[in-house]
Image: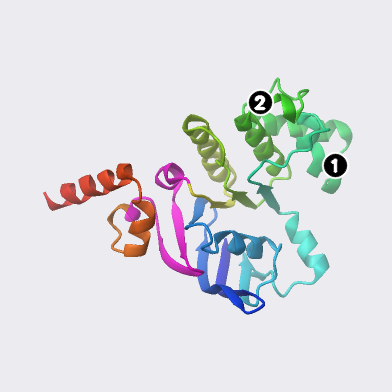
Amino acid sequence: MIQVNNLYKSFEDKEVLKDINATFENGKTNLIIGQSGSGKTVLMKNIVGLLEPTRGEILYDGRDFVAMSKREKVLLRREMGMIFQNAALFDSLSVLENVMFPLDMFSDMNLRERQKRAMECLDRVNLVGAEKKYPGELSGGMQKRVAIARAIALNPKYLFCDEPNSGLDPKTSLVIDDLLHGITKDFQTTTIINTHDMNSVMGIGEKIIFIYKGTSAWTGNKDQIMTSTNQKLNDFIFASDLFKKVKEEEMSHQQK
């Protein structure tokens, strides 16, 4: 579990995050949603240590990340897996070598053990047979699945995903969502996903944090979001005609 308590972040005289309080639970897909510029990416960067908060606490299972020494933070980062928006694969490495990269860097396994573990991860994302290919030979969806395999290679306790469905078609996005949700359940990871994808919100949003102008404006799950009375959240979620229709049908059903 990751807890964010009274978190503030400023850049010079601009306050981007204001008194953020949030709990991200293990074994659940925790989603951070909000408009572009709302502060959700800054929040995730603070949580993983890419940015230093102006003040506040970030607790990893009770361990205060902000107060840790540099060495302690390095050790904690070995418990993290990260999936970046553009997959961030190494073009000069094969699929297998990409997945092995964190194992080469941080594990004590011998070569055979590292190869075996990498193949297990590729099997988990249904990419056995693609291990000799290079990123340039893969579709966008396959690249994201390689990135997921690499992120779980070290059996992380905490998994961070920044817009994992960015640039993907709806069908492929569902595949990625199912993979992330399955991995979260199977390994009881604390998974945090930044997303704009409303299909992800309604499909795997077990815990949802809505960020509005740098504040945590609403917390709930995919079922509660349909009946929320938070106007700012509704304006964001139901901006499309499709979700407006779903909302109207849900409210109509409740009134019967």
- Magenta residue check for 200: yes
Find residue 77 and report its horizontal and vertical position in percent.
74, 57
- Disc number for residue 89: none
* The quadrant where residue 186 appears: top right
* The quadrant where residue 10 appears: bottom right
Residue bearing the label numbered 2: 127
- Magenta residue check for 224: yes
First to last magenta residue range: 197-225
Q: Type of residue at label 2?
A: Leu
Residue at 33% x, 51% y is 238
In this rendering, the answer to whether 27 lies above or below 96 is below
Residue at 62% x, 32% y is 140
Instruction: Work out which quarter of the rendered image holds the N terminus and state it.
Output: bottom right
Query: Which badge, 1 or 2, comes first in the chain's sequence?
Result: 1
Residue bearing the label numbered 1: 104
Q: Which residue lies furthest to the top in this view?
A: 129
Q: In this view, does 167 lie to the left or right of 254?
A: right
Find residue 54 and report its horizontal and vertical position in percent.
65, 77
